[in-house]
């Protein structure tokens, strides 16, 4: 197993040498990072390739770990929604549904032992929360960019595998990961501002981060939360 250090975090990856034209990177469902490269490619170049993709790798690994912890869905376990911790209550019912109380979230289930049904209810809970909250935050964060984006960007909500969000500035489109619904509003807003800044700078240059710091001074704290640091 090979490894590199990035922002005080260790990224381990399995290196497979085979006859391929490019360096390829894959993240398995269990979080294992696999890199394949030709035998003639120096190890230093492969490490640089992994380092260049480190942010995406760490985000994907963190999301996998978050999903693992959420997938237990045991009675009395903790579920987070918009930054608040709720106690999970499982109850048998004639239909599969969900109710959010003041301190509890109740899953009503035809089969309380069916993990797939519980996962589907959880995903629906995140998606429904995102569909209400994300459009409001897109509008709220729009003001500093109204001269760049002539209209409020189109919003898409998806279960992204390796990103918290992305944007296509030419199409005036922002896509957000529905799993951001787990986090509080400031964390979600930091991702929205991040994508808005890409309408100005299509990179992660110093100018990009200067602009991000101007519109979202707390982005570094949010970034640490998203990376579980």
Image: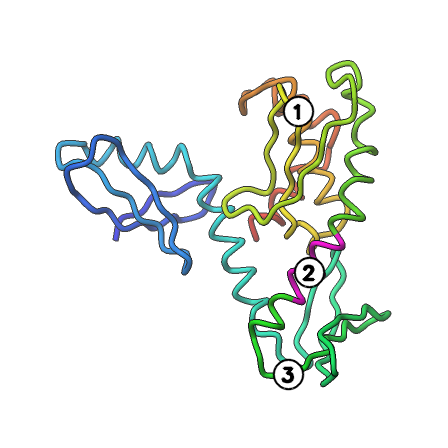
Q: Which residue is mark 2?
A: 124
Q: Is residue 8 above or below residue 80?
A: above
Instruction: Using the numbered discs, state the Cα–Cα distance from disc 2 to disc 3 in whole angstroms.
Output: 17 Å
Q: Which residue is mark 1?
A: 197
Colouring style: rainbow
Residue 166, position as x, y percentages in the image: 59, 34
Q: Nearer the viewer, mark 3 or mark 1?
A: 3
Question: Which is nearer the N-term, disc 3 or disc 1?
Answer: 3
Label disc, if present, on residue 3 of the rendered structure: none
Within-10-Å neighbours for mark 2: few <14, some 14–19, many 20+ = some
Residue nearer the viewer, 71 or 223: 71
Which residue: 38% across, 43% down? 5
Residue nearer the viewer, 77 or 11: 77
- Helix or strand or loop: what does disc 2 sit on? helix
Asked if labels 3 and 2 touch by Cβ distance under 8 angstroms, the answer is no
Q: Is residue 33 above or below residue 99?
A: above
Report if residue 123 lies within the magenta region: yes
Within-10-Å neighbours for mark 1: few <14, some 14–19, many 20+ = many
Q: Which residue is mark 3?
A: 112
Question: Which is nearer the N-term, disc 2 or disc 1?
Answer: 2
In the figure, residue 176 lies in which quadrant? Answer: top right
Asked if labels 1 and 2 touch by Cβ distance under 8 angstroms, the answer is no
Residue 98, position as x, y percentages in the image: 76, 70
Q: Magenta region: which residues?
A: 121-129
In the figure, residue 25 lies in which quadrant? Answer: top left
In the figure, residue 57 lies in which quadrant? Answer: top left
Which residue: 64% across, 60% down? 123
Q: Nearer the viewer, mark 2 or mark 1?
A: 2
Which residue: 49% across, 48% down? 60
Question: Which is nearer the N-term, disc 2 or disc 3?
Answer: 3
- Helix or strand or loop: what does disc 1 sit on? helix
Instruction: Using the numbered discs, state the Cα–Cα distance from disc 3 to disc 1 in whole angstroms.
Output: 44 Å
């Amino acid at each position: 197993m090979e490894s590199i250090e990035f922002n005080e975090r260790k990224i381990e990856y399995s290196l497979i040498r085979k006859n391929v034209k490019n360096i390829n990177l894959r993240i398995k469902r269990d979080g294992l990072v696999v890199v394949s490269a030709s035998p003639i490619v120096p190890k230093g170049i492969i490490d640089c390739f992994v380092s260049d993709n480190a942010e995406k790798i760490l985000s994907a690994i963190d999301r996998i770990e978050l999903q693992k912890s959420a997938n237990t869905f045991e009675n009395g376990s903790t579920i987070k929604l918009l930054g608040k911790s709720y106690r999970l209550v499982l109850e048998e019912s004639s239909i599969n549904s969900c109710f959010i109380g003041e301190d509890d979230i109740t899953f009503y289930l035809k089969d309380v032992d069916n993990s797939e049904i519980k996962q589907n209810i959880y995903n629906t809970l995140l998606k429904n929360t995102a569909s209400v909250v994300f459009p409001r935050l897109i509008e709220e964060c729009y003001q500093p960019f109204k001269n760049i984006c002539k209209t409020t960007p189109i919003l898409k909500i998806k279960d992204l595998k390796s990103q918290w969000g992305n944007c296509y500035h030419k199409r005036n489109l922002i896509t957000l990961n529905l799993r951001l619904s787990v986090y509080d509003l400031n964390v979600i807003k930091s991702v929205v501002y991040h994508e808005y800044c890409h309408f100005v700078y299509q990179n992660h240059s110093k100018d990009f981060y200067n602009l991000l710091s101007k519109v979202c001074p707390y982005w570094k704290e949010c970034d640490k939360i998203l990376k579980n640091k």
